[in-house]
Image: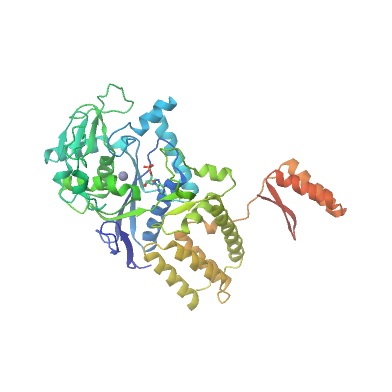
């Protein structure tokens, strides 16, 4: 595959732009990772499915992608305005667990969930707490260059000294900074933010470090600047996150990075995934506790890949409403897809793709190159599967190609073996006997009892089988 021209939507400038990497065919990709004080919710996971699709797309077009993702295990305060508690410390206080254990527990859970969703693990996963010296170095650099000042509770970045501050979010800086005098708690400007916070509030913190300015911990934004630069260089190709990161986190990352290095743009492309919410415009957020986890979907009988398919049905820049009804529809599609693919696989002979199949392939690549149009790819897939002028082998080969991006694990599809307990086996035999005896009432009763245990009976030419409901 040649490096086809890809168009991606750059939040910086708010337009589709042709993508070309800084260094030939190498792409540096940085994704803001999870804050690990709780389980990632299914909305958070949408942000990582988006980053996964982007990475898969770039790899499909033959780019060598160095994907880096951080783990925020310190410094993310409950308010984006540098006030409130550290989310991690707060959770530790609430549960009585050690903060390090909490971080490990939710980091492990995060990767368990992303693996179940076939999200490829980033090549480099870096924890904020493993990179304190790098963050201190960056604060030092900002101080040396005159961009930082110290207040009673920390070292702050002086946003008025960076002319382009707020460009990403198109912030109305005058409006934000002007107006009535507000209590800035020692800050010079409302948009200034902490790059190092002191632990001088009388509380002993579980996570704190010495620094030239006093014992404390890094501000949240500095970790992403320090770690992305460490692994990808002072400027790199693409930075991703959810749309909530635009006005504060990414705005601040850009300001401090470009001031520290004197180079720009810090990232050539800024890409943001839209939010997943509940029906009726309810927000899904970790801090409010109003959220669903992947485990809760699994407990309700859904396969994680059915959730992945649900997400792929919407473009990453469209907001999406979650409901079990919609997920159920994706479950039905996923099962249908699975049956079709398994049938096609049995007939695949790896014969060459004909002209019509090549056209489908070209359409797929155009959708992918058009800002990752996954809904377009999905509808193309269903057209392929329905097209009687294609051979079974062509259909299968196309589906497997599309799946390099869809990531539904199509080449692994196989009939699920149901582990049948003795009790279920007995009920199944009772039903078979009742049917042989034409005792329909007894057969129905056995079937209902099987259903009450979460299985349904499927009659096939090879006999009756059980399937999980
Ligand atoms: P956090 O763990 O809170 O730092 O968030 C992890 C990622 O999830 C970030 O990229 C957020 O922008 C993203 N995110 C948070 N809430 C949602 C949501 N409801 N839908 C989609 N993405 C979200
Ligand atoms: Zn970040």
Q: Is residue 283 above or below residue 389?
A: above
Q: Position of residue 382 (x, y in %)?
A: 53, 67
In the current view of this chain or complex, which residue is farthest to the right?
437
Q: Is residue 256 above or below residue 405?
A: above
Q: Position of residue 433 (x, y in %)?
A: 84, 50
Can the viewer see residue 258?
Answer: yes
Q: Is residue 137 left or right of residue 30?
A: left
Identified at 47% across, 72% down, the residue is 360
Identified at 41% across, 57% down, the residue is 318
Q: Position of residue 441 (x, y in %)?
A: 83, 50
Identified at 26% across, 61% down, the residue is 24
Q: Is residue 109 above or below residue 262?
A: above
The number of numbered discs placed on residues in the rendered structure image is 0
Q: Nearer the viewer, residue 244 or 124?
A: 244
Q: Nearer the viewer, residue 420 or 370?
A: 370
Q: Position of residue 1 (x, y in %)?
A: 38, 67
Would you identify the image quadrant in which residue 395 lies?
Answer: bottom right
Q: Is residue 123 left or right of residue 252?
A: right
Can the viewer see residue 433?
Answer: no
Q: Is residue 209 above or below residue 28?
A: above
Q: Is residue 443 left or right of residue 257?
A: right
Q: Nearer the viewer, residue 118 or 14?
A: 14
């Amino acid at each position: 595959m040649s490096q086809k021209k890809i168009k991606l939507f750059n939040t910086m400038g708010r337009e589709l732009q042709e993508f070309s990497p800084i260094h030939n065919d190498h792409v540096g990709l940085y994704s803001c990772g999870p804050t690990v004080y709780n389980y990632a919710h299914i909305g958070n996971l949408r942000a990582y499915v988006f980053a996964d699709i982007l990475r898969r797309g770039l790899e499909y077009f033959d780019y060598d992608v160095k994907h880096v993702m951080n783990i925020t295990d310190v410094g993310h305060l409950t308010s984006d305005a540098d006030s409130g508690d550290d989310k991690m410390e707060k959770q530790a206080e609430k549960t009585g667990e050690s903060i390090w254990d909490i971080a490990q527990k939710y980091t492990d859970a995060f990767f368990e969930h992303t693996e179940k969703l076939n999200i490829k693990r980033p090549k480099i996963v870096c924890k904020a707490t493993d990179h304190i010296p790098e963050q201190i170095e960056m604060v030092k650099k900002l101080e040396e260059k005159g961009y930082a000042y110290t207040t009673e509770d920390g070292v702050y970045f002086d946003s008025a000294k960076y002319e382009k501050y707020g460009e990403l979010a198109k912030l109305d800086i005058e409006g934000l900074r002007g107006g009535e005098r507000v209590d800035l708690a020692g800050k010079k400007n409302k948009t200034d933010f902490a790059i190092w916070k002191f632990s001088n509030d009388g509380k002993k913190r579980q996570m704190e470090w010495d620094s030239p300015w006093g014992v404390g911990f890094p501000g949240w934004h500095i970790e992403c600047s320090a770690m992305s630069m460490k692994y990808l260089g002072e400027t790199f190709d693409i930075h991703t996150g959810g749309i909530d990161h635009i006005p504060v986190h990414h705005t601040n990352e850009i300001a401090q990075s470009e001031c520290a290095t004197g180079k720009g743009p810090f990232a050539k492309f800024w890409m943001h995934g839209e939010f997943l919410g509940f029906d009726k415009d309810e927000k899904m957020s970790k801090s409010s506790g109003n959220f669903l986890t992947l485990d809760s979907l699994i407990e309700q009988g859904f396969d994680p890949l059915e959730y992945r398919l649900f997400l792929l049905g919407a473009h990453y820049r469209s907001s999406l409403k979650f409901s079990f009804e919609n997920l159920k529809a994706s479950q039905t599609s996923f099962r249908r897809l699975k049956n079709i693919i398994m049938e096609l696989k049995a007939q695949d002979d790896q014969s060459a793709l004909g002209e019509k199949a090549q056209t489908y392939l070209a359409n797929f690549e155009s959708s992918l190159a058009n800002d990752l149009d996954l809904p377009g790819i999905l509808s193309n897939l269903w057209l392929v599967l329905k097209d009687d002028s294609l051979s079974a082998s062509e259909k299968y080969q196309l589906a497997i190609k599309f799946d390099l991006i869809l990531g539904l694990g199509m080449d692994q599809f196989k009939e699920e073996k149901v582990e049948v307990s003795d009790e279920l086996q007995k009920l199944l035999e009772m039903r078979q006997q009742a049917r042989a005896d034409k005792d329909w009432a007894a057969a129905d009763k056995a079937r209902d009892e099987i259903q009450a245990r979460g299985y349904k009976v499927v009659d096939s030419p090879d006999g009756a089988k059980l399937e999980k409901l």
